[in-house]
Amino acid sequence: MTAPKLEISPEITAALLAGRAVVALESTIIAHGMPYPNNLETAIALETIVRAKGAVPATIAVLAGKVRVGLGQSDLERIARNPAIAKASIRDLPLLMARGQDGATTVAATMRVAAIAGISVFATGGIGGVHRGWEHTFDVSADLTELAASSVNVVCAGAKSILDVPATLEQLETMGVPVIVYDSDEFPAFYSRQSGIKSPSRCDRIDELVTIIRAKNAIGMKSGVLIANPIPIEHEIPAREMAAYIDQAIAAATKAGISGKAVTPFLLAEIAKQSEGRSLEANMALARNNAELAGELALALSQPR
């Protein structure tokens, strides 16, 4: 928590010292997941929701080479208004720090920083994973390896539906990461509540989630726990409809020669265009939904046993 490599806001430092609930939030969803001003509105909304649940929000980013835990509104605006800001995964952190540059942290980088700071709950939109065509490109997100390495409980709406979801779940199983779907028998597919894949395990209550997390910690498991929280039904886009948008977006990315870390932002923007903004609305809704569950979980974990 006092590691000199991090700049933790006084509010978050005080909350961690007092054992109060804190929820980590990523900054890539602001910089690369949505256009301005929707991204800024969402960033502010997520922090507001976490506070309403009784927890302290800790948005994480790299600004002027400093790894920051807890941002002010001017910092959020700085990220939201800069579409050229670096997308910062784990391997990018040392370069950005050494060069004094800005970076919006991905799920993997946010998890690593949260773990160093002592924050055990993190709310995001959807995790990265195994990309379609991985057998040719070997494109697998560092989010998965970080889930195996950092003891942070990640609340998400499943893996992004642009991915190879079955392969992503197989990889998580191989790495020993517990995967729990909240209040559903089916693993969610980000924009859609259903993916056609049965939940590895289901949990319907916060107190049961807390018991599972504490049991994991008690036997010394170093991984995080992935908690998949389906998008609210009134905001979802049915999986069959999404499949058509995704196929078209992937074809466009292939034609444009998009690869590496640029793939996901390109696909999200292309899908938003094809769906006439419905996917953007869904993305914002699922992020808010995840912040609510993460706030409740953080508060429950902060209570005495």
Image (cartoon, rainbow, N blue to C red):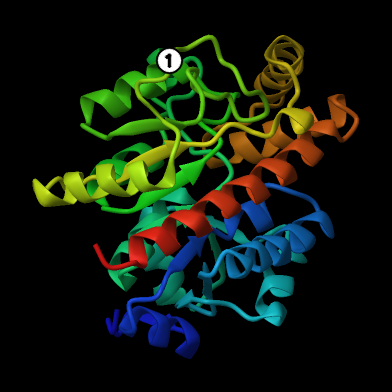
Residue at x 64%, y 81% (from the top left corner): 72
Residue 59 location (% of width, % of height): 54, 68
User: Quarter holding the N terminus?
Assistant: bottom left
Q: Judge whether residue 270 can be spotted in this image.
A: no
Image position of 257 (left or right of 281): left
Residue at x 56%, y 36% (from the top left corner): 157
Rendered image quadrant of residue 122: bottom left
Q: Nearer the viewer, residue 76 or 135?
A: 76
Whether residue 197 is situated above or below residue 169 in the rendered picture: above
Amino acid type, label 1: Pro
User: How would you rate the neighbour count of disc 1 (Cα within 10 Å): few for under 14, some for 14-19, many for 20 or more?
Assistant: some
Q: Nearer the viewer, residue 106 or 176?
A: 176
Rendered image quadrant of residue 277: top right
Residue 186 location (% of width, % of height): 50, 18
Image position of 269 (left or right of 46): right
Q: Judge whether residue 192 can be spotted in this image.
A: yes
Whether residue 111 is situated above or below residue 100 in the rendered picture: above
Residue at x 67%, y 28% (from the top left corner): 191
What is the residue that sits farthest to the left in this orientation?
219
Residue 291 location (% of width, % of height): 58, 54
Image position of 160 (left or right of 298): right
Image position of 218 (left or right of 186): left
Residue named by callout 1: 166
